Amino acid sequence: MKNYAPLPVTFTHGEGALLWDSNGKEYLDALGGIAVCALGHAHPEVTQAICDQAGKLVHTSNIYQIEVQRQLADKLCELSDMDNVFFSNSGAEANEAAIKLARLYGHNKGIDSPTLIVTDGSFHGRTLATLTATGNRKIQAGFEPLVSGFVRAPYNDIEAIENIGQNNKKVVGVMVEPITGEGGIRIPDRDYLTKLRALCDQHGWLLILDEIQTGMGRTGKWFAHQHNQIQPDIMTLAKALGNGVPIGACLARGEASTLFKPGHHGSTYGGNPLAGRAALAVIESIEKNNYVKRAAELGDYFLNGFNQKLDQIEGVTDIRGKGLMLAIELEQPCAELVKQSLDNGLLINVTAGNVIRLLPPYIMTNEQADIVIESVSNAVIAFLLNNKK
């Protein structure tokens, strides 16, 4: 089906932050499969774990106990201080589980139409419920009727959420990204999540954090909310959790962790032995190599480099980031830079129309980062000169 418009390149293999195409050309990957390949390509420890597990047992189903799934759940709960986990195949499915938990929570309180507050510019997935929760009208168009039970507020606007809470007694929770990914790497005010936590506590709402892109160390903490020293009631993960092996996770604590009973929700493949073993290997490698700290340090290195190159360039409206979620915002649409960079041997992304998004792997070297900084900066400067208003 023609739902993708792939660029004219086919990659055959990779190593670390490098990829090679079918013609033997080398590329530097500053996108990491859209924040998935945090440990780069063909990571030896993850590769070995996948091969070892594939030679023993790939799948049994959740009709039976899966030891590696339990080990992974224990490890995630240890890192996050959450109580339990539901495993799925993707971030969208993890968010579906979170939405279903919120509805159960509301019905248990006697609310007949439980409602979640979601935010503009968010991205939570492409299933019907997560599509509705997503704050992007373009990806919703044509798929109406959308799912009821969602009300929207501007991102990074606590007052708007307070007003909704005063006027809508069916609200049961707030679902938000700590930093928007597809929405353009928008970083909210320092106290935004702290105030959201307090507001949820005040109203008896669930705080649901979509950490699918921010989680697993990318922002310089295991999970982005840890910068604020708060706890969500529900948190969703995917992307970097499996380093390319499909896996999602919905973590819960407190009352939210007790809501699902047998038969309420399920997944045929979710948390199977192969995916579980891969995710455990990812976590073990991140811990052993102190990659969370590396993500913070490398992110600062990138920001310093881009600020030196682009801070005074007319047409660059912002340079921002947290760890290895990096953005260069221009005053005009710049999607053509993706193909131009590909031709120059560099993988980047443009989101929200005018935001260059970089999601490099944690294993990228400073020397490789210098190449990214130089290449992107030169491309931006040339683009702005050629498109001067």
Image: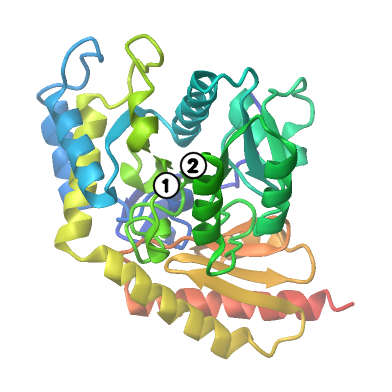
Is residue 247 at least partly visible in the picture?
no
Task: Please state the horizontal and vertical placement of residue 312, each as a whole percent of the image.
Answer: 68, 90
**What label sits on residue 232 in the rendered view?**
1
Quarter of the N terminus within the rendering: top right
Q: Nearer the viewer, residue 348 or 221?
A: 221
In the picture, the disc for residue 380 is none
Q: Earlier in the sequence, mark 2 or mark 1?
A: 2
Say which amino acid is labelled 2.
Ile
**Looking at this view, is 84 or 183 the one in front?**
84
Q: Amino acid at mark 1?
A: Pro
The crowd level at tag 2 (other Cα within 10 Å; few <14, some 14-19, many 20+) is many
Q: Is residue 195 above or below residue 146?
A: below
Q: Position of residue 281 (x, y in %)?
A: 18, 45
Circles 2 and 1: CB atoms closer than 8 Å: yes
| Residue at x 21%, y 66% (from the top left corner) | 290
Question: Residue at label 2?
Answer: 208
